[in-house]
Amino acid sequence: MTFSFLKKTAFFVFIFGSVTGTCKAQFDQNYTPLSSAGTLPPEFLTTARALSEQEIAEMGSVKDKSAKKQFIISNNYFLRDLLLSGDVLVNDPLSKYVNRVADELLKGQPALRQQLHIYVTRSPDVNAYAFDKGFIFVNAGLLAQLENEAQLAYILAHEITHVIRKHSVTQYIENIKLENGTSNYERGTMEERALARYRFSKEQESEADAEGLKLMKQSGYSIKAMNGAFDVLQYSYLPFELLDFKKSFFEDEYLVLPDTLFLKKTSEVKSNDDYDDTKSTHPNIRKRRGAIEPELKVSDEGSRKKYLVSESEFKNVRETARFELCRLYLMERDYMNAIYAAYILSQRYPDNLYLKKVISKAMYNVLVNKPVSNSNVVSSGSISIGSGNSTMSSKQYTVPDYTTIEGASQRVYYMFDGMNSLELNTVALAYTYKAHKQFPADSVLSNLTDSMFSAMVNRNTMFLNDFSKSTKSELKMKDSVPVAESTEAEQEESKYSKIKKQQQKTEIETDENFTKYALVGLLKDEEFVTRFTKMAKGLTQKPLTDEYAKTAKPKKKKKKKNEVPLLGIDKVIFLDPFYMKVKNDHGTLSVKFYDSEEHQQVLAEIQKKCAEKLNLEYVTVTTKSITEGEISKYNDNAVLNDWLGERFSHGDNNLEMVTSSEYIQQLIKSAGTKYIAWSGVYNSKGKASRNTYFFILLDLETGKLVKYETRYARGRDHKDLITSMVYNSLMHVHKKPKNK
Amino acid sequence: MEKTTTILRYSFNRALAASALLLAPFLVSAQIPGYLGKRLMVGYSNNFFLSTVDPTASSYDLGMNTTHSLNVEYTIKNRTNICASFQMFRTGIAVNTGFIEYRTTSSGSTTVKTYTYYPIPDAPMVMKTKCLALGFKFFKRGSFAPLGKYRKLEAVLMFSNISYQPLTFRYIQGNKTGRASLGSGNYSYKEFAVTYTLGRQRILFDRLVVDYGVQFGFMPLGALSITDYSGTVNITNYPGAMESVLREESNMRLFRYELFNIHLGLGFLAL
């Protein structure tokens, strides 16, 4: 018996140790982003139209049938769009875990459990949401913030109530009635109706809170832990941990950041849970907390637990979500949060390659958006846009105002905002190069290092000689020797050398000039010097000096021919095209969902036909006709959508790197091309029919916008009209320029 | 001599049309997509207009005047087509003008004969016109040739021939009436016109071109030489007066039906 007990204890200790150890070991070296696995569930394989028609047929004769029908059509369209966007994870560890929590929560209600489809979505927003059809989506951003499993269970219970009570359709019908003035709930002015809409939504949320609590009570989860769920919601705008940010993170023996870049005191967290919720869809946190508090007081915790599935698994899932969050922040261009999140995780996993890459990528993208003070900038990478092509709006990134940030992360905003281009370049180069030395086999870090060398030479016009090879103290020593020993030499010294010495002294004494001495250690590294020199030699454009600028004659601008460049590309990847047909009824827009879905398919066919006519090879990455076994296709689509989403957020800013590029290398290889084409049509039919067509061609390797074309045509969106537009775009893509 | 000149003129016109078509490919830049790469369109269109006040070729009754047109088009710019067409138009002319002839006899007295066209059976004069047209189609912004709404500007060379029965002129001389021959029964002439068309083209099954629209036009030279021939015309002092009347009538017919019409065409994308 004793032996057995000891054996069991030892076994549990071993298991616990190995689980937590595995969790740590899992993230120690690297992190692989989440992707879907297994087979695709049937709900991913049916068209929105088929889903809607089936649902409408099953609906029978009910009250408000027309509104319900409209709701079903639109809801299924958006649901399918979400399911195929790639943001939804299938059979991944996070979704599996969340489903197991739902299993525990609904242990006594197997029929209800069967109706539910729960997925984790790759979004940094702290949120979860439900569709009436039984789909519940939990964002990775929410998982990253949770404290325990019971909180997740309560959030699921809340969403399940929305499903059971069919809150979405009820709200949809109520909104229509409010619009028409036929609602029993409220009739009045436009503002009164808007407020009524908010009140109605708040009532539903309160109901979901109360009913969710009942579900929790029926389960074995801790009731008291629920209170923490409201904390999670209240402080959702803060990072998942509040850890003091230390500038030493970027420093070494030689690179010492001045104190002026470091905010001495960060602002306190001021969140108020009793905010004005008049124009909010949810009641404020105090009201929500207050509504369940009496229940919390009387509830008997007894055998209730915070964890029913597994504590270690919860922590593993949360940590995974936090790692994933770093990538999602990067993709959303939230570089400060990406750096801070990676910084927090780096404290636990200092040798994690993924985290180092997140920080390096974020710093690089902040760097390329920093204004450069001198005029010697080589504007590389900007695309030449001929007539017939359009321009995307330029979206420059600026570090958000640090005064609007609360908590410890404020220091990150302050520091990166305060650094000028050269300073940031120096810090980023030093950090990335050191990471590269630690992981020499990683091509991303190696390429990033080169990009930072390039920025140093081309943006900041800094060459090797501009950095000191000696430390401040070494220079002081050198400086003092000749002065003390050779008065004769000093007498013979020229005026100019004296001036230079004086300037050197001033530089040494200036605290803020940290960049000059920041690379002392790295300049002793042969590879660093070689690569820096190589990049400097590659500088092709002569830096503009004042003299040069004076003598240089202004060049006459040549009139550009009214021609769109021919690109001579042999193969492209086609992504599912976009098609939206909208009815414009005196300014009120309504989407024609069935038509939109059908025309999307038509446009895809047109695309293929035109490519074949032109002998342009193509690969299609589509999820519209996906089968259950094609999970790799689903993941490819997800990766491409991530890439495109991120790239589009940059506008025509070609300098900024697409941070998710490293995950599409395999796809580029298997597709045999680095060019991706995406096209779409927006058709609006009011008094007249109007069509806006767009075509975008991007280089997946560099992120460069190769072609962007928009066309506007009046008239119906006949197949021939769309064909002529698509053919024209693809012809420019495929045809080789004559002079090549 | 006259025949040689006519042949030379014909040859010149043909050469002009042919060279324009031959030159077209050289004007085309590599940027032009055409429709799925096809830039040449060959088609037939029927230009028609209801004949309300004027007769058709066969009767004075209400009918339809039609022009058969064979068209060739070539896309030379994103939104521009060069077009050539050969058209045939056939209609009837009702000549209501009387022709007065004054004749002085050996005795010194003057006889007056008034001729009117009075064929048996009562049928209008037949007018046949062959046209060669050369022009440009400009498609609306947003669409690519040969698709969408367009405006067409064409120069048209018209070769008209009016045939009538010369022996069917009825004359009145005092209280005497009879039949007499007047003219040769055939009159040919050339005319130049400019037309402007508003239309739309659609492509079906990636090959068939459907074309419809409205045409307006005018004859600059014809407009300059309008003479009012209402009533009677003296053919004694003006030997060419009858031809002038016929030309005037014919031009009016061309103006009303050949230059103003609705068209519906069908073609195919050839190359």
Image (cartoon, rainbow, N blue to C red):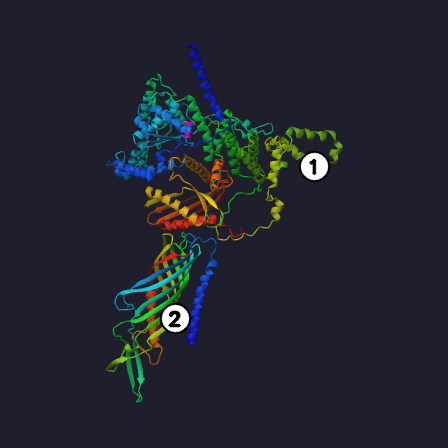
Where residue A627 appears, x then y in whole percent? 38, 37
Query: Which of A52 and A3 lies nearest the eye of the viewer?
Result: A3
Q: Residue at x 70, y 37 (%)?
A: A497
Label 2 near label 1: C-beta < 8 Å? no
Query: Which of B145 and A459 lies nearest the eye of the viewer?
Result: B145
Compared with A123, A613 (above or below) is below
Which residue is labeled 2 in the image?
B190
Res A380 quadrant in image:
top right
Residue A637 marker: none
Q: Which residues are magenta?
A: A139-143
Res B39 quadrant in image:
bottom left
Where residue A60 appears, x then y in whole percent? 24, 36
Tag 2 subunit: B
At label 2, the amino acid type is Lys
Report if residue B227 is visible in the image.
no
At label 1, the amino acid type is Ser
Which residue is labeled 1 in the image?
A497
